[in-house]
Image (cartoon, helix red, strand yellow):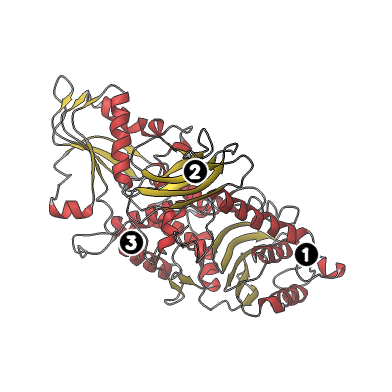
Amino acid sequence: MGMNQLKCPVFTGFERRLAALICVFGAAALVFSAPAQPQKTAELKPPATLAELRQRLTDHLAQPRFAAALWGVKIVALESGATVFEHNAGKLFTPASNSKLYTVALALDRLGGDYRIRTSLYAAARPDSSGTLAGDLVVYGRGDPGFNERLNGGDIYRALDPLVNALTNAGVKRITGDVVADESYFRGPPFGAGWMWDDMEYYYGAEISALTINDNTLRLRVQPGPAVGAPCRLSLQPATAWLTFSNRAVTVAKGAARSIHLYHPLCENLIFVSGQMPVDGTNYTDEVTVHNPAGLFAGFFREALIRRGIAVAGRARSVNWLDREARPVDYGRQVELGAVASRPMRELAREVQKPSQNLYTDLLLAHVGEQSRTANTAARATSEDLGIRELNRFLGQAGIPAGQTLFEEGSGLSRDNLTTPGATVTLLQFMHRHPESQAYLDALPIAGVDGTLRNRMKGTPAAGNVRAKTGSLRWTSSISGHVTTAAGERLLFSIMVNRYAGATSVRADQDVILAMLAGFTGRATE
């Protein structure tokens, strides 16, 4: 994660994923087997009355191991709005990826579930009768996250086929100028406000760009060299020379421990690889971020054109908002040769919420922000600034009082985002009444089934029942959403924990609460 290994341990991508799985399966095991503080068998029976439920919840939060932690809980009946339970519901918490509940709600409200993000192909004029396009071809992005191999059978060029098809449909056979990737629709730095520098080495801290390609990451594969003492072999998928490596990783004797470390300096496309791999070792893979993803987009797109028989005389390059400030272009006077539309917003909402995708969330926030820009908007207002301004307006319309939600970016990667459990439940109530309520609900992970909840709450009444958004940062865990009780009553909940540094994952304790709610046989209005 960083160069200074004397200060903190460095984990490989595999080890990070393994640790995450251990946390998930460990959390699940705590729900079904012995909790940290053993309970009597009678206490494990589902609560039958509202008073019993409240007491059980109170006792759970009051365990001595939570003395230094801060819990916030709000649970209400969906139909009546009656409060089932609350604890510190008005205090501000770091919500982590529960922030995505807010950004996705904003996007669905301001844009609608059918809305699609447009990526355009511009030129100074149409091709001549021979199919020659004089000058540059510009691909102008507005934040569509769909150009990636993951959604296209592992083929990045297949992901770009719709753009190539749009160009061939316009009759283009030859381009005399450059292929220019224009990401200037978004204004501001490529990182969200409040992000930590060391997050930006990892896939979840990928740069924000109006022209996003392959989630702005590449998959690095490290293999042992042919003999002990030889450098390890490195390769990228999709293959590209956009990233370069300083390879200090060596092949060691059979049976030795594997230890691979990556260091990616900010705003560079150079990665230092160090450590060792046994000569009989298996492949190590990790996702690495790229700097200036629009430049990578231009390179892949130029290659895609050539593969389809379109000759390109010029090079691949990119321009951003600062470049366009220096040399403005009025695309209203350019010719749009073709365009490609993203998946509809309701599908993008699922791509955000189910896996908790940070990049896509911040793309949506920036896009909403730019959609609100007018001729009177200050030129220096960033896309993120405008998105947050629009979010604050939306939250006021949703009935959330000012000061209960303080966001500076959209995904929750910032530790400075703040909200209350009460505000989060109010948002859930508002979105239940919203025209896009079904799209909003369908985007949420389902306990024991998919997304970030696929391995949680299995074997409990909450499995297949709870629909909720998770959130995790160091010392922070949150989960908010819907659950149906054993009596058939639907509840909304927000459970947030900050500053918990226990030996076991606090997610297990959140899962205990949700299993308790799912098994509740009483009524909220007793």
Q: Give the mark toward the camera: 3 or 2.
A: 2
Please identify the quadrant where the C terminus is shown.
bottom right
Question: In this figure, which residue is indicated by the disc labeled 1?
Answer: 521
Task: Determine the CA span between mark 1 and mark 2.
Answer: 61 Å
The amino acid type found where label 1 is placed reads Thr
Q: Nearer the viewer, residue 12 or 494?
A: 12
Would you identify the image quadrant in which residue 42 lies? bottom right
Q: Residues within 10 Å of mark 2 (few under 14, many from 20)?
A: many
The kind of secondary structure element at disc 2 is strand
Which residue is depicted at the point 64% across and 63% down?
507
The answer to which quarter of the image holds residue 175 is: top left
In the picture, measured across the screen, residue 269 lies left or right of residue 473, that is left
- Do the CB atoms of the residues marked 3 and 1 lie less than 8 Å apart? no
Residue 514 position, x and y percent, is: 68, 63
Task: Say which label, 3 or 1, has the lower sequence index.
Answer: 3
Residue under circle 3? 384
Q: Amino acid at mark 2?
A: Val
Say what secondary structure mark 3 lies in: helix
Residue at the far front in the pictured view: 229
Above-or-below relation of 103 to 297: below
Task: Please name the residue shown 53% across and 34% down the image.
Answer: 227
Does residue 160 appear anywhere in the picture? yes
Q: Which residue is mark 2?
A: 250
Mark 1 or mark 2: which is in front? Answer: 2
Total numbered labels placed on residues in the image: 3
Q: Amino acid at mark 3?
A: Glu
Question: Which residue: 20% across, 55% down?
Answer: 322
Q: Circle 1 sits in a helix, a strand or a loop, which is it?
A: loop
